[in-house]
Amino acid sequence: MDTMTDEPLQNQLRELAWRRKLTDAEKAALRTQPEVQANLELESRLSQALARVPDAPVPSNFTARVLQAIEHEEARGARTRSWSWYWRVLVPRAAVAVAVIALAGLAYQHHQFDKRAQLARDMVLLAKAQPLPSVEALKNFDAIQRMSQTAVQPDDKLLELAKQIQ
């Protein structure tokens, strides 16, 4: 026989063996398959042994306690999921924000350092330059500047020679 077509029959007989003893006709159907018969016989004995075990006493509010325990587990699972969301979403975003702020701070600090270094170089150049004139010299600067300029007066001899040439 093909095992694919026999499987539903085996499952059906197995379920029946859990609930009650198999009939002679059902046992006859199993005799054609000795390996399945051995498994079902073992399961049948196990089911009979379990049926002889007395039921454990159960408190009157057993169902309510089971349902309460289920609700408690679901609530705990919801809290766990919320923390999971926190760690998966918020922490990476916060880490990126901190990294961006840190990089911006470092860039600003580098800019300020360059600015101060340039100011120091300028101060060194200024210190090495020629000394500035005194304040007294700057007060009379206009007069000194006019003295250094010579008044241009026409040269009469040169003008007479230019006329003769023409």
Image (tube, grey):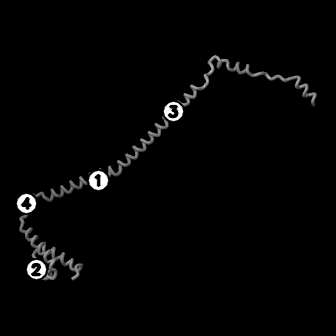
Disc number placed over residue 57 in the picture, else none: 4
Q: Please name the residue that numbered disc 2 is placed on.
A: 23
Whichever of labels 4 and 3 marks the residue nearer the N terminus, that label is 4
Q: Please name the residue that numbered disc 1 is placed on.
A: 81
Q: Work out which quarter of the rendered image holds the C terminus and state it.
A: top right
Number of the front mark, 1 or 3: 3
Q: How many marks?
A: 4
Question: Which residue is rendered at x = 15% and y = 59% of the image?
Answer: 63
Most foreground residue, 7 or 121 = 121
**Callout 1 secondary element:** helix
Amino acid on which disc 4 is placed: Pro
Image coords of residue 78 (percent x, y): 27, 53
Question: In the displayed structure, would residue 32 be above or below residue 87?
Answer: below
The CA span between labels 4 and 3 is 88 Å
Number of the front mark, 1 or 4: 1
Disc number placed over residue 117 in the picture, else none: 3
**Callout 3 secondary element:** helix
Image coords of residue 19 (percent x, y): 12, 72
Disc number placed over residue 46 in the picture, else none: none
**Callout 2 secondary element:** loop
Amino acid on which disc 2 is placed: Thr
**10 Å neighbourhood of mark 4: few (<14), some, or many (≥20)?**
few
Image coords of residue 71 (percent x, y): 21, 55
The CA span between labels 1 and 4 is 37 Å
Pointers 4 and 3 in contact (C-beta within 8 Å): no
Image coords of residue 127 (percent x, y): 57, 25
